[in-house]
């Protein structure tokens, strides 16, 4: 599977800027320099990003370090979490020590009905990443536990950020730009009620990009 590279790495080829994507989408209606169409194109591009966010992507794997507190049971997580991948404990030197076991909420509640005592957590769950935005340990973190492991590192697949005028699309590999451009063209063509052939052409393109992105994301990296 593809793993996201550190933010300090510049991929080649690079991402298009938001302005370039807007112009590409608006040009489908022969209006690449029209401010009104460019605004519509930005909305169309972000609709494509919303479509991408309907599934988790391994290439958008990120991490969030969470500072643990004495008797803490619930901890806030990053606001762009799509699906959690792994929760690792870090020692006082910042070294990854071990992972906590993830459990689905129902199993978690069945196994850990009494969570009133503090201790050494062994498992965690996410009740609802989209509404509560917290992880929950099976026991509250004790002071003795935090003295050894003051930090937890949550690795997760993140949601992609929306484009903004003047910005650059930085989430994921540059290939995602192709999907966003053609989804945006299709979305714009639909909203403007362009000819069926123009709409169908754009749809074929974004669906092909989607198929390739999914296939690539499901691939397994090897040292062949």
Image (cartoon, rainbow, N blue to C red):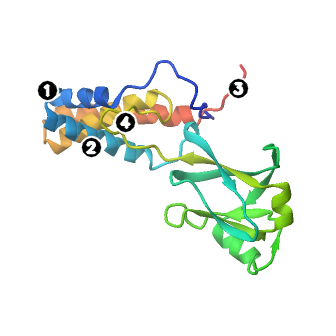
| Disc 2 to disc 4, C-alpha distance | 19 Å
The numbered mark, 4 or 3, whose residue comes first in the sequence reads: 4
Q: Which residue is mark 2?
A: 43
Q: Residue at x 18, y 32 (%)?
A: 198
Mark 4 near mark 1, Cβ–Cβ under 8 Å? no
| Disc 1 to disc 3, C-alpha distance | 44 Å
The numbered mark, 4 or 1, whose residue comes first in the sequence reads: 1
Q: Secondary structure at mark 3?
A: loop
Q: Is 36 above or below relative to 76?
A: above
Q: Is 135 above or below relative to 196?
A: below
Residue sitting nearer the eye, 27 or 91? 91
Q: Secondary structure at mark 1?
A: loop
**Position of residue 119 measured from the top left corner of the image (x, y, whole percent):** 83, 70
Judged by depth in the image, the label closer to the viewer, 4 or 1, is 1
The numbered mark, 2 or 3, whose residue comes first in the sequence reads: 2
Residue sitting nearer the eye, 186 or 76? 76
Judged by depth in the image, the label closer to the viewer, 4 or 3, is 3
Q: Is residue 29 left or right of residue 210?
A: left
Judged by depth in the image, the label closer to the viewer, 2 or 3, is 2
Place residue 181 in its image quadrant.
Answer: top left
Q: Which residue is mark 1?
A: 30
Q: Which residue is mark 3?
A: 222
| Disc 4 to disc 3, C-alpha distance | 27 Å
Q: Which mark is residue 207?
A: 4
Q: How many numbered marks have been drawn onto this rendered protein structure? A: 4
The numbered mark, 2 or 1, whose residue comes first in the sequence reads: 1
């Amino acid at each position: 599977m593809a793993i996201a590279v550190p933010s300090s790495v510049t991929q080649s080829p690079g991402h298009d800027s938001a302005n370039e994507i807007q112009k590409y989408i608006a040009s489908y209606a022969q209006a690449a320099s029209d401010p009104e169409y460019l605004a519509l194109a930005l909305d169309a591009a972000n609709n494509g990003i919303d479509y991408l966010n309907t599934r988790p992507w391994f290439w958008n794997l990120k991490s969030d370090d969470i500072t643990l507190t004495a008797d803490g049971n619930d901890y806030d997580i990053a606001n762009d979490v799509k699906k959690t991948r792994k929760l690792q404990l870090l020692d006082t030197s910042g070294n990854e020590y071990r992972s906590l076991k993830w459990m689905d909420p129902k199993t978690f509640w069945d196994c850990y009905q009494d969570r009133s005592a503090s201790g050494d957590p062994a498992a965690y769950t996410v009740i609802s990443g989209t509404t509560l935005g917290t992880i929950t340990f099976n026991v509250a973190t004790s002071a003795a536990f935090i003295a050894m492991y003051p930090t937890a590192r949550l690795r997760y697949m993140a949601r992609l950020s929306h484009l903004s005028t003047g910005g650059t699309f930085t989430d994921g590999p540059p290939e995602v730009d192709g999907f966003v451009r053609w989804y945006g063209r299709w979305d714009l063509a639909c909203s403007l009620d362009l000819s069926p052939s123009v709409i169908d052409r754009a749809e074929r393109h974004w669906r092909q990009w989607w198929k390739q992105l999914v296939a690539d994301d499901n691939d397994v990296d090897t040292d062949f």
